[in-house]
Amino acid sequence: MDFAHYTSHKSQEFKDIIWGAMEEAGRPNVMDFFPIFRLLDPQDKTSSTIEWAMAELLHNPKNLVIVREELAQLLAKGEKQLEESLISRLPFLRAIVKETLRLHPPAPFLLPHRPENDVEVCGYLVPKDAQILTNVWAMGRDSSIWTNPNEFMPERFLESEIDFKGQDFELIPFGAGRRICPGVALGFRIIHFVLASLLFEYDWKLPNKVNSEEMDMSEKFGLTLHKAQPLQVIPISMHNNNFK
């Protein structure tokens, strides 16, 4: 869509959205000044991804059954504890994380970029010093790249080598190149380990007799992508603590 027509209400709306995002990005993080509250950091992106993964699994219970069976089979093979080193042996869990990041990237727009010279991209002239915003949310839902792009289908990654570490441009929720998010390695470990722990240690039920089809899966755009309605679930303990 061409947003260069300044008389269009759509171009003004787009400008307002971008300015709002930039204002939020420029705000100082209160946790930088009060480290004691860091665990409650409302700007932490990892927690948003875990929430989306849990929401999608509860919304698509067949995938929840598959990943829990995968976890149970792994621990049934003599593993007494689920440790970080075992994540590589959980392909469906890793596929769930990739699919979650495709549909719900932590930051809908990557950090702004600026070309040092005029450059032509796909027939469009991008002038020097223009501000470039990469819409990774739209990329993840592009039907020319993904089959059934609006459906949560972790199995699409089981036979694919596509990863989100910046080498495959179909999936770059953390950016790519020299300006890739410096916390991607830590985020990778935290998301997989916490999600595995939650799924194996507890069964999860929706409150107030809500069924999976009735879940509110709408999104709230901002600096990070959140659920419009925070996920509410009831944990039911199933095992003794087998995690380290």
Image (cartoon, helix red, strand yellow):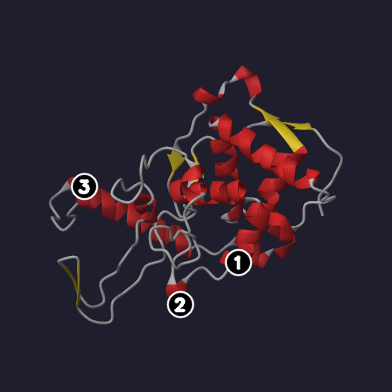
Between 145 and 73, the one nearer to me in the picture: 73
Residue 172, disc: none
Question: Residues at badges 1 and 3 in contact (C-beta under 8 Å)?
Answer: no
Identify the image quadrant of residue 4.
bottom left
Bin the neighbour count of mark 3 within 10 Å (Cα to Cα): few under 14, some 14-19, many 20 and up: some
The reply to whether callout 3 and callout 2 are in contact (CB within 8 Å) is no
Tag nearer the camera, 3 or 2: 2
Residue drawn at (79%, 43%) of the image:
76
Relative horizontal placement of residue 165, taking residue 119 as reference (left or right): right
Residue located beneath label 1 in the image: 185
The answer to which of 210 and 18 lies nearer the viewer is 210
Using the image as rendered, state which of residue 8 and residue 57 is in the foreground: 57
Tag 1, which secondary structure? helix
Q: Separation of disc 2 and disc 1 at Cα?
A: 14 Å
State which quadrant residue 31 falls in. bottom right
**Please, what is the three-letter code of the amino acid marked with disc 1?**
Ala
| Mark 3, secondary structure of its residue | helix
Residue labelled with disc 3: 10
Residue type at the position of mark 3: Lys
Q: Position of residue 101 (x, y in %)?
A: 49, 51
> Upstream in the sequence, badge 2 or badge 1?
2
Q: What residue is disc 2 on?
A: 178
Toward the viewer: 75 or 36?
Answer: 75
Q: Is residue 69 left or right of residue 48?
A: right
Ranked by sequence position, the earlier of labels 3 and 2 is 3
| Mark toward the start of the polypeptide (1 vs 3) | 3
The residue depicted at 49 percent of the width and 60 percent of the height is 163
Classed neighbour count for the residue bearing mark 2: other residues with Cα under 10 Å, few (<14), some (14–19), many (≥20) = few
